[in-house]
Amino acid sequence: MGGDSEQACPVSPVVDLVFSRWTTPILWTLNEFGRQRFVELQRAIGTITPKVLTQRLRQMERDGLVVRTYHPEVPPRVEYEISDLGRSLAPVFAHLADWSAQNLPKVERARQEFDAAGETR
Amino acid sequence: MGGDSEQACPVSPVVDLVFSRWTTPILWTLNEFGRQRFVELQRAIGTITPKVLTQRLRQMERDGLVVRTYHPEVPPRVEYEISDLGRSLAPVFAHLADWSAQNLPKVERARQEFDAAGETR
DNA sequence: CAGTATCCTTCAGGATACTG
DNA sequence: CAGTATCCTGAAGGATACTG
């Protein structure tokens, strides 16, 4: 990550930060459904294992995108919420969702044409 | 890719498409500097090997993001350029670059604080 | 509940060499 | 020049089991 190549491209750093595996669904879930406990989050995401979820959450906490709150009770309760910094990504996500809605069908068509052209060989 | 989890998150599909490794610098280079030959592109990116560059370009051509033009000459000449669909991502990229400029410093500070807090244990 | 601790697999991506 | 063909490695991520 962060090779010389991406130095020139101003988008690459934020890609490493925000669009690495699992960060998008985690951020989106926290933004959409608010504060979540660990297990709630795990169930919301659906297929992520506790180990990997912990890794991502730690990284995102370190990056200041999520806030972890530990309640020393029995049984223990931990809550994760999106930070202001994380929330500042919401317009970016909305922009991407817009692009998606308008252009993903075009991508699908392009793929079909490409594959069809390949058949002819 | 494209597990059940990301189904709920409307951003995930476009992430797989646009923000997988190397696609960002490639798109950015083509958008910024216009039509490029294979070797020019390789040099512009800096560290990518021909094999991987070919893989990414094929994928992006299939997805309709770049256009490949083959000139049957000796020696052969191939040019890549960004498509209209690819160009439609420019505002998204600009948006990300803006976010980056405003918020990456905050991320850096968050990391330092997090690491400093860890030292205290 | 909220994680850790291990073990294991896979596969994207790099190194290198070769071709039409 | 514009790729292909192989070989290979590392590191992310999954499966599983265990703990305070």
Image (cartoon, coloured by chain):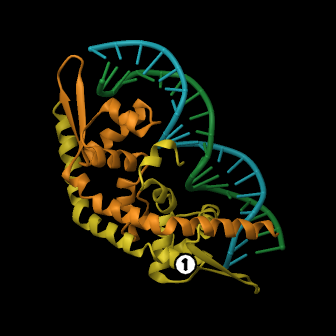
Chain colours: A orange, B yellow, C green, D cyan
Q: Quadrant of residue A34?
A: top left
Q: Residue at x 61, y 75 (%)?
A: B38
B105 or B65: nearer the viewer: B65
Compared to residue A87, the image places residue B100 above or below, namely below
Q: Residue at x 48, y 63 (%)?
A: B18
**Residue under pointer 1:** B83
Q: Quadrant of the N terminus of chain A?
A: bottom left
Residue B63 at least partly seen: yes
B29 or B13: nearer the viewer: B13
Q: Residue at x 45, y 73 (%)?
A: B28
Amino acid marked by disc 1: Ser
Count the numbered circles shown.
1
In percent of width and height, residue B8 lies at: 43, 47
Tag 1's secondary structure? loop
Q: Quadrant of residue A71?
A: top left
Q: Residue at x 62, y 68 (%)?
A: A109
